[in-house]
């Protein structure tokens, strides 16, 4: 294929030929056939140019108010809705996700909703937390970083977590930062279409040309340089634990902030009273949650803790039958299928018993059988590290404990997770057990859930999509929820004895913007 067939990168406001070191072609996971589009693997030259352009845009943004940022986000959301058909069609080809029920019905509305929430926060300044101590004349607020923010998008949410459309993108833009988007190789065409609309929205709103830039793939050493470059402000990353830790190491060495979402098994504790009360209902909820989207959710219930008894035996028989009968969905790519095979084998090597599935195939395209495994509580305690590794796909591990004490000891050995769920009886039969389990689980998860499965992350100001390591790199930050998600990409600026006329408008005497401010220990507007 000739050089003219290689898709261009977006750098400094222009679609331009990449200084590529090689190329790649995405594969349709349903047909296993190439999509016939060729994309560049960018050299360090592309990356350096993008970084320098973003740094210049960061300086230029100082002369623009938050209204321009909000206008861009709202304009971009409108343009996405106007091009929804093209976006849905491309994402369907690259991910095999259903058009109506997933891409058009869930992802696209969520994407434009969070962009508009970010626009509202940019306009009303709710995230900057202006704080004033009148006695000392010290004032502070959050403000944009210096330099661009790099966003690495995951393979499983091409819209709502996409590098040029998702939550990290919206939060970093709302804070006033230019973006360098690194597309996920599973859906570069979808990301390119988003970038086309983002560029037009940049022009319409009068922002710097290099406010939004796009590269598709880099070599590992170039990716490390990207996150550690002196002119980069911060990085947002959602993806595999191994690759994320390599980038974190590079960023940490350079003193650059990097916010990572890495891995989570999302433990579910089903207490005995709940199982006796509504075991069939819980079984249906679990199977639906675990197999939703072929298990390719960061909040998939990958570890279930139950007490060994007759009700648990019936529950396992029920979910095993449902796993056998449920259609096998398509995975996002060959690497995901291989990752499932390797992960299931690793669980078996650590002592897990295979109940259902355990082989590649059973569906269309890249796929792996719906898989259930189980271990005893004693086995888990002896191999806790190996038995809580995330498997990205349609699989879950059941842990059968002898008693509540053993369950508590298991919870104490869990790594950090995005979510933790406890099912308890409605009549109070599990209240004592709940009170003993939750204090341990609560500190190991970002979001505690009661009586529902963890899949599904509402875009709410109160949402925490984060958690202790390795769920994320920073347990006090969330990647979902405006305004909290914005402060990851901001710096706290303090002004000591600066006269009112020289202060940012948000901190000036008289409150010319009429915003809420924390003055001498009280919120005042």
Image: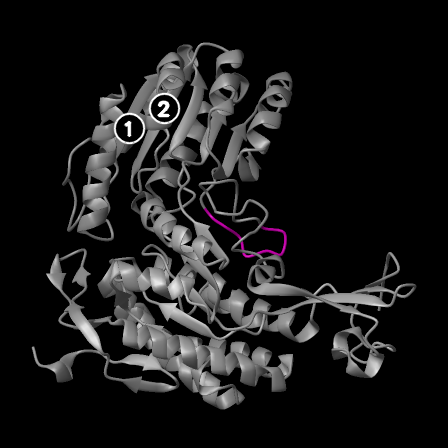
Determine whether label 2 and label 1 are within 8 Å by CB.
yes
Image disc number at residue 372 = 1
SS at badge 2: strand
Q: Quadrant of the C terminus?
A: bottom right
Q: Residue at x 38, y 23 (%)?
A: 384
**Residue where numbered disc 2 is placed:** 398
Q: Residue at x 23, y 83 (%)?
A: 17
Please state the horizontal and vertical placement of residue 319, each as a whole percent of the image: 33, 27
Q: Main secondary structure of the magenta part?
A: loop
Q: Residue furthest right?
A: 135
* Residue 34 in which image quadrant: bottom left
Looking at the picture, the colour scheme in use is one colour
Among numbered discs 2 and 1, the one appearing first in the sequence: 1
Please state the horizontal and vertical placement of residue 185, each as a whole percent of the image: 26, 62
- The relative height of residue 202 versus residue 393 in the rendered view (above or below) is below
Spatial CA distance of label 2 from label 1 is 7 Å
Q: Residue at x 40, y 15 (%)?
A: 377
SS at badge 1: strand
- The magenta span reads 456-463
**Numbered marks: total:** 2
Look at the image and tell me whether residue 393 can be seen: yes
Q: Quadrant of the N terminus?
A: bottom left
Please state the horizontal and vertical placement of residue 269, each as a whole percent of the image: 49, 26
Q: Residue at x 62, y 26 (%)?
A: 439
- The relative height of residue 216 versus residue 296 in the rendered view (above or below) is below
């Amino acid at each position: 294929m000739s050089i003219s067939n290689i898709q261009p990168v977006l750098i400094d406001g222009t679609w331009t030929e990449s200084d590529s070191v090689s190329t790649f072609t995405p594969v349709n996971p349903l047909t296993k056939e190439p999509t016939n589009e060729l994309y560049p693997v960018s050299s360090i030259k592309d990356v350096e140019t993008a970084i320098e352009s973003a740094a210049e845009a960061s300086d230029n943004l100082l002369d623009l108010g938050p209204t321009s940022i909000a206008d861009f986000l709202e304009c971009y959301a409108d343009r996405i809705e106007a091009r929804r058909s093209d976006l849905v069609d491309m994402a369907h080809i690259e991910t095999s996700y259903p058009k109506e029920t997933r891409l058009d019905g869930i992802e696209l509305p969520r994407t434009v909703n969070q962009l508009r929430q970010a626009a509202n926060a940019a306009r009303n300044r709710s995230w900057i937390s202006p704080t004033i101590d009148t006695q000392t004349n010290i004032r502070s607020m959050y403000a944009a970083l210096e330099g661009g923010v790099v966003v690495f998008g995951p393979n499983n949410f091409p819209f709502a977590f996409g590098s040029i459309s998702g939550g990290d993108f919206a939060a970093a833009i709302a804070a006033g930062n230019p973006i360098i988007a690194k597309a996920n190789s599973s859906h570069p065409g979808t990301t390119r279409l988003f970038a086309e609309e983002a560029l037009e929205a940049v022009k319409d709103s009068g922002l710097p040309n290099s406010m939004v830039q796009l590269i598709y793939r880099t070599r590992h050493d170039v990716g490390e340089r990207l996150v550690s470059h002196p002119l980069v402000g911060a990085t947002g990353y959602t993806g595999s634990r191994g690759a994320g830790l390599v980038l974190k190491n590079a960023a940490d060495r350079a003193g650059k902030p990097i916010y990572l979402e890495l891995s989570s098994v999302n433990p579910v504790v089903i207490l005995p009273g709940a199982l006796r009360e509504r075991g069939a209902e819980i079984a249906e909820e679990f199977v639906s949650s675990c197999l939703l989207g072929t298990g390719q959710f960061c909040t998939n219930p990958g570890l279930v803790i139950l007490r060994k008894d007759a009700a648990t035996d019936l529950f396992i028989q029920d979910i095993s039958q449902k796993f056998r009968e449920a259609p096998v969905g398509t995975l996002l790519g060959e690497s995901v299928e291989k990752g499932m095979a390797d992960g299931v084998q690793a669980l078996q090597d650590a002592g897990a018993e295979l109940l259902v599935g355990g082989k590649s195939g059973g569906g269309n395209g890249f796929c792996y059988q719906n898989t259930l495994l189980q271990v005893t509580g004693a086995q888990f305690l002896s191999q806790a590290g190996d038995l809580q590794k995330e498997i990205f796909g349609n699989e879950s591990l059941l842990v059968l404990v002898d008693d509540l004490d053993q369950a508590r000891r298991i919870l104490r050995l869990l790594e950090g997770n995005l979510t933790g769920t406890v099912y308890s009886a409605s009549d109070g039969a599990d209240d004592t057990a709940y009170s003993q389990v939750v204090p341990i689980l609560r500190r190991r998860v970002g979001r505690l859930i009661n009586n529902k499965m963890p899949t599904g992350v509402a875009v709410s100001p109160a949402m925490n999509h984060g958690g202790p390591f390795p769920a994320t790199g920073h347990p006090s930050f969330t990647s979902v929820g405006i305004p909290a998600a914005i402060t990851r990409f901001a710096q706290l600026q303090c002004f000591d004895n600066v006269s009112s006329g020289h202060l940012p408008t948000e901190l000036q005497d008289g409150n010319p913007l009429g915003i809420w401010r924390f003055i001498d220990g009280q919120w005042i507007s």
